Amino acid sequence: MARIRTAVSGLTKRTNRASRRLANVAASLPVSAVSDAISKVSPRDFARTFASVLTAAGWFAIALVVLWWPLGAALRWVEFAIAGSIALLLLLFALPFLLGGQNYAIQYEPNSTADIRLTTGEAFETTLLIENSSSKLEMPGQLESSFGDDHLVVRVPLLGAFGTYRHTIRRPNMKRGKLVLSWRSIRKDPLSLVRREVPFDPALGQSDKTVWVHPKIAKVGSPLRGIIKDLEGNPSAQLVDSDTSFHAIREYRAGDSSRHIHWASTAKIGKVGEFMVRQFQETRRSRVVLILAANMTEYQKTSSGEELNSEFELAVSALGSVGYQALRDGRTVTAVMGRARTGEAVSSGRGASRAALRELKATSKFKLLDSLSEVQLSSRASQRTLKEVSLRVGQTYHDVSLVVVFCGSTVTDAQLRTVQQNLPKGIGILAVVSNPSGTASFRTIEKMKVVNLTSLDQISSAVKRFQR
């Protein structure tokens, strides 16, 4: 008996020690923290979160569980009860797919960091390099991104530690525009009952890829000489009393500045009280203003089956061609189009005129073409017409020496005459009327030269004729 009591006593002590150890382990676990976190989640927040991950198929499964299962049990319809039970099992099977994140690092081949620039009509192709940036196995996933009117989906297979997967994206015959590849990582079950977007970790260096599709441009050829006057030695025909380009000597008139008196010529005359002064030719800065009409009424309506307005696309390409050549010649280019009216009362003055204009970035050739990739034709009634835009240009830019207007075939000669009257006097004005279905022509409206453009390759000859 003594041996039995000793054995029982030792077993009791060992049991107590094991119990204390389990208690210590349980105390070390964050059970309280987990329970506090769960208690902070309200049923409403949980329901909202759960509803946000359900797809249409998921809502249908919920309906089967909520309606068919109780109905089958109450009416003893085995088929309904089985359908509800299967739907519940599928939902429980789908929920674990929402857990965790995806450690994808995305790069592009070639030109991993630079923007992609194409020309209208060219094919777009890039290779997406997807890497598992963790040392753990990464479950199959999916990447999605919008790309213009398309929706891109890349299904990523199972990736091992630091494994990679390449996917090539091809799109033929790109149209003018700005497109952004902004990928989203999707967590979803195989039956698409639930779906959750997982944001990329900024530490992995994820960034959007911008694709610029530039308009087609044609080579203008000769520099814009003879139509642009600047401060570097190209004088205009306007005579003024003070400038940098000497023209001739004339007799002194009241109001002339004494610092322009030519003393050598005055001494040759030898008459008391009579002076000879210098006369100058006015020199002007090399600012070129390009005006693009953007109101739908200023272009012929698009034919059935055409997605883009052919007249507007030709006008954009012509503007890009002239602006590209002017920037190449070292000129200061300002490309503008009208903004839509906001309906608010705007004060008059130069500030109000500038606010009515949308100035495109034209500090470099690529900046100009990038800006032209984004311009769109507006059908809103609030969009300013060419008449108002030209008036605002005349009020805003006083150092302009050349204005080129680009519009469609619905703009009449009377409207072009009004545009000329709104612009500063004594400058070169060229109107380029896009009319692919018309006849090429060149005419003059008062002092404005007007060219009817039927194709882009005619822009070079039009500029040459304008400079004559």
Image (spheres, rainbow, N blue to C red):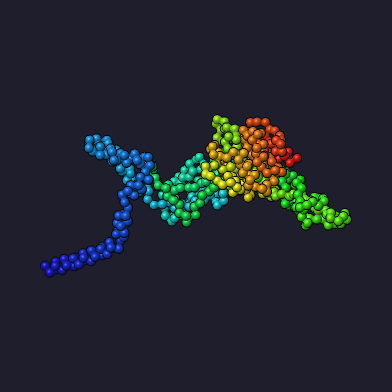
- The relative height of residue 225 versus residue 434 in the rendered view (above or below) is below
**Quarter of the image that includes the N terminus:** bottom left
The residue lying toward the viewer, choosing from 278 and 180, is 278
Left or right, 169 with respect to 395, comes to left
Residue furthest toward the left?
1
- The relative height of residue 201 versus residue 191 in the rendered view (above or below) is below
Left or right, 16 with respect to 276, comes to left
For the image, the number of numbered tags is 0
The residue lying toward the viewer, choosing from 67 and 282, is 282
Residue drawn at (61%, 48%), measured in percent from left and top? Answer: 350
* Res. 346 visible in picture: yes
| Residue 321 x, y percent position in the rendering | 66, 42
| Residue 380 x, y percent position in the rendering | 53, 38
Residue drawn at (36%, 48%), measured in percent from left and top? Answer: 49
Residue drawn at (60%, 43%), measured in percent from left and top? Answer: 337
**Quarter of the image that includes the C terminus:** top right
Residue drawn at (51%, 43%), measured in percent from left and top? Answer: 147
Residue 23, quarter of the rendered image: bottom left
The residue lying toward the viewer, choosing from 116 and 258, is 258
| Residue 9 x, y percent position in the rendering | 16, 67
Left or right, 330 with respect to 169, comes to right
| Residue 7 x, y percent position in the rendering | 16, 67
* Res. 234 visible in picture: no
